Image (cartoon, rainbow, N blue to C red):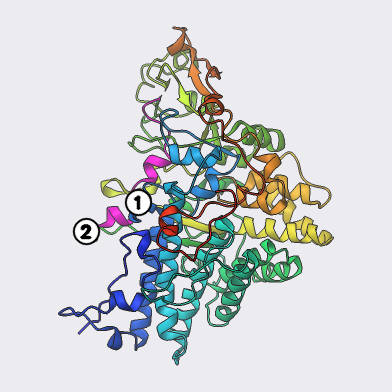
């Protein structure tokens, strides 16, 4: 009879550290017992599939956790804390949890933080089921590979935890119901654990066969393991060790940057499994899967979409945008826009792939009214395009996120999402290597920094390798990839760069709507842009506190061995 693996689920954060075996050791008709299940290669493969499923589902959307809703745990807690975006939405009463993080008035009850914490430990729990049951008895290449892949998932989840919370518990095995693990000794101890897991896994992992090997982009490989190890060592400030690990990815010849004219395909269906992907989760539409909707990151189309209640979306013939109402929670900050335009110029491939101007949306995208308003002069007078709300688009300075905005290509039949979640790409590897070179006085990293800049078609191409040059490029290239906040903390400049976070949230308005003008003309209304400073006088980045997040109250409430982070 075909063996069936029952996926582990967690009902609440209080159960995060409950025993794996106790909870799966339930006698049910037609279900293989724990003692009989973990035996064969097929069993190992089935258990590993559960790790992929758990990681893909919980890194993409915390709506499946008991503590969160709507969020993307891979990105949101770290992006909300950065200075390259505004946490927007309908108005200042919307997206409160994200605004708390962005303006640093969060506490231990923040549901984005709690949901992300729970998601990471869910992944660790699934990985530990494989490692605990097969690591010591792995007597076939299949079992060894499954254990190795599970180790990398566990290491990646621990990295997110370490960067987010500093000293969360290291969970290296399935826990009993009575276990209440305390804080890790240090963040460095967690980073050491991650490096060890990577080292234990690498020899048993497959390698991507070529730059065009899509299968090698959607499964754990040596390339991702070396990249993860390098990232952990970089955060540990072991730059020599990080360089060695990252150079193995570069020298493998299995990865490359996509061409400039393909940058817009990054993070979209047409770019899935491309040469730049180090690792991504593969989401393939299957009409026979009855719960596909819930597996397919259902809120991405709303979270990442432009705010349809505020701006009329260009849905004319040939539109790249699907017929979906967006919530508009992610808008590029003025700081980021100004930096990108100054460094790259408005015509660069990266600018065009990352953000769109208001004029581009108004006049270069198709609307249903184009037949009635065919010329540019006509379009300027068309009331059925552009900002429609008198109070404008909240948290916006006239530039709109394009990089991660879901497009028609990202949807399968029945309006289902088929968009891969990218965990890491080659550009980040090159910039990490360049930074490690800059930190160690090795000018060879300039080649890789320039490679990223030249692909972007940036006006500014670095002539020397300095940490400042790498920092500037990382800010622009890795926008909305969950890098910025943790980079600022690691560089020791978070208090300076994040000092104004949450203090300026303007509205982008159109004179045709607000002043009855005959033509469209966008402008910034900042009359109430500093509302948060008055409503939340406690806001603002505090050095020695806000470099890391608070441990969730719900976890502290059931785990007396976990000590809260300073200042919370």
Reply above or below: 529 against 54: above
Q: Residue at (58%, 28%) from the top-left corner?
A: 504
Q: Residues within 10 Å of mark 1 (few under 14, many from 20)?
A: many
Which mark is on residue 299?
A: none
Q: Which residue is mark 1?
A: 63
Q: Kindly state the secondary structure of the residue where label 1 is placed.
A: helix
Look at the image and give the residue range highlighted in magenta.
290-310
Residue 373 sits in quarter: top left
Q: Is residue 334 magenta?
A: no
Q: Say whether disc 2 or disc 1 marks the residue closer to the N-terminus.
A: 1
Q: Is residue 236 visible?
A: yes
Q: Kindly state the secondary structure of the residue where label 2 is placed.
A: loop
Q: Position of residue 422 (x, y in %)?
A: 49, 56
Q: Position of residue 303 (x, y in %)?
A: 41, 41
Reply above or below: 178 against 1: above
Reply above or below: 361 against 55: above
Q: Position of residue 175 (x, y in %)?
A: 41, 75
In this view, the residue farthest toward the left is 29
Q: Which residue is mark 2?
A: 290
Reply above or below: 397 against 260: above
Residues tagged 2 and 1 counted as in contact (Cβ below 8 A): no
Q: Is residue 220 visible?
A: no
Magenta: main secondary structure: loop
Most foreground residue, 109 or 345: 109
Q: Is residue 556 left or right of residue 8?
A: right
Q: Is residue 294 magenta?
A: yes
Most foreground residue, 492 or 176: 176
In this view, the residue farthest toward the front is 560
Q: Residue at (40%, 19%) from the top-left corner?
A: 389
Q: Residue at (56%, 51%) from the top-left corner?
A: 482
Most foreground residue, 191 or 415: 191
Q: Position of residue 219 (x, y in %)?
A: 47, 69
């Amino acid at each position: 009879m075909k063996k069936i693996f029952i996926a582990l689920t967690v009902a609440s954060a209080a159960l995060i550290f409950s025993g794996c075996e106790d909870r799966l050791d339930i006698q049910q008709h037609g279900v293989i017992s724990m003692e009989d299940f973990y035996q064969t290669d097929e069993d190992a493969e089935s258990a590993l599939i559960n790790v992929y499923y758990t990681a893909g589902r919980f890194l993409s959307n915390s709506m499946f956790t008991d503590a969160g809703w709507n969020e993307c745990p891979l990105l949101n807690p770290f992006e909300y804390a950065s200075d390259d975006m505004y946490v927007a939405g309908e108005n200042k009463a919307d997206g409160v949890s994200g605004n708390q993080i962005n303006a640093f008035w969060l506490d231990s009850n923040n549901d984005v933080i709690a949901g992300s914490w729970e998601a990471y430990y869910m992944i660790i729990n699934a990985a530990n089921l494989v490692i605990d049951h097969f690591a010591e008895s792995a007597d076939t290449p299949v079992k060894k590979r499954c254990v190795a892949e599970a180790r990398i998932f566990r290491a990646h989840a621990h990295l997110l935890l370490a960067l987010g919370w500093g000293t969360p518990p290291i969970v290296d095995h399935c826990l009993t119901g009575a276990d209440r693990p305390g804080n890790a000794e240090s963040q460095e101890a967690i980073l050491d654990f991650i490096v060890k897991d990577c080292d234990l896994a690498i020899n048993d992992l497959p390698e991507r066969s070529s730059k065009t090997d899509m299968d090698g982009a959607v499964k754990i490989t040596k390339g991702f393991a070396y990249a993860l190890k390098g990232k952990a060592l970089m955060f540990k400030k072991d730059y020599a060790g990080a360089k060695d690990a990252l150079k193995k990815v570069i020298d493998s010849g299995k990865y490359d940057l996509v061409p400039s004219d393909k940058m817009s395909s990054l993070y979209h269906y047409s770019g899935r499994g491309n040469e730049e992907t180090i690792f991504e989760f593969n989401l393939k539409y299957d009409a026979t899967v009855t719960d596909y909707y819930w597996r397919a990151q259902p809120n991405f189309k709303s979270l990442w979409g432009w705010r349809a209640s505020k701006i009329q979306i260009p849905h004319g013939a040939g539109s790249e945008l699907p017929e979906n109402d967006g919530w508009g929670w992610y808008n590029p900050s003025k700081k980021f826009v100004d930096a990108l335009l100054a460094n790259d110029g408005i015509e660069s491939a990266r600018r065009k792939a990352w953000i769109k101007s208001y004029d581009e949306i108004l006049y270069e995208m198709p609307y249903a009214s184009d037949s009635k308003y065919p010329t540019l002069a006509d379009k300027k007078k068309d009331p059925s395009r552009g900002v429609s709300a008198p109070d404008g688009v909240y948290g916006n300075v006239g530039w709109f996120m394009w990089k991660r905005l879901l497009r028609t290509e990202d949807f399968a039949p029945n309006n289902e999402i088929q968009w891969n979640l990218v965990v890491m790409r080659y550009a980040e590897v090159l910039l990490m290597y360049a930074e490690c070179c800059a930190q160690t006085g090795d000018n060879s990293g300039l080649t890789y920094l320039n490679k990223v800049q030249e692909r972007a078609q940036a006006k500014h191409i670095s002539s020397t390798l300095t940490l400042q040059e790498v920092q500037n490029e990382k800010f622009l290239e890795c926008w909305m990839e969950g890098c910025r906040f943790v980079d600022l903390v690691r560089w020791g400049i978070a208090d300076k760069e994040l000092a104004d976070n949450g203090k300026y949230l303007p509205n982008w308005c159109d004179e045709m709507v607000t002043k009855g003008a005959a033509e469209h003309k966008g402008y910034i209304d900042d009359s109430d842009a500093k509302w948060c400073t008055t409503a939340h006088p406690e806001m603002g980045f505090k050095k020695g506190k806000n470099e890391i997040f608070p441990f969730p109250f719900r976890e502290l409430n059931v785990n007396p061995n976990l000590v809260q982070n300073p200042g919370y």
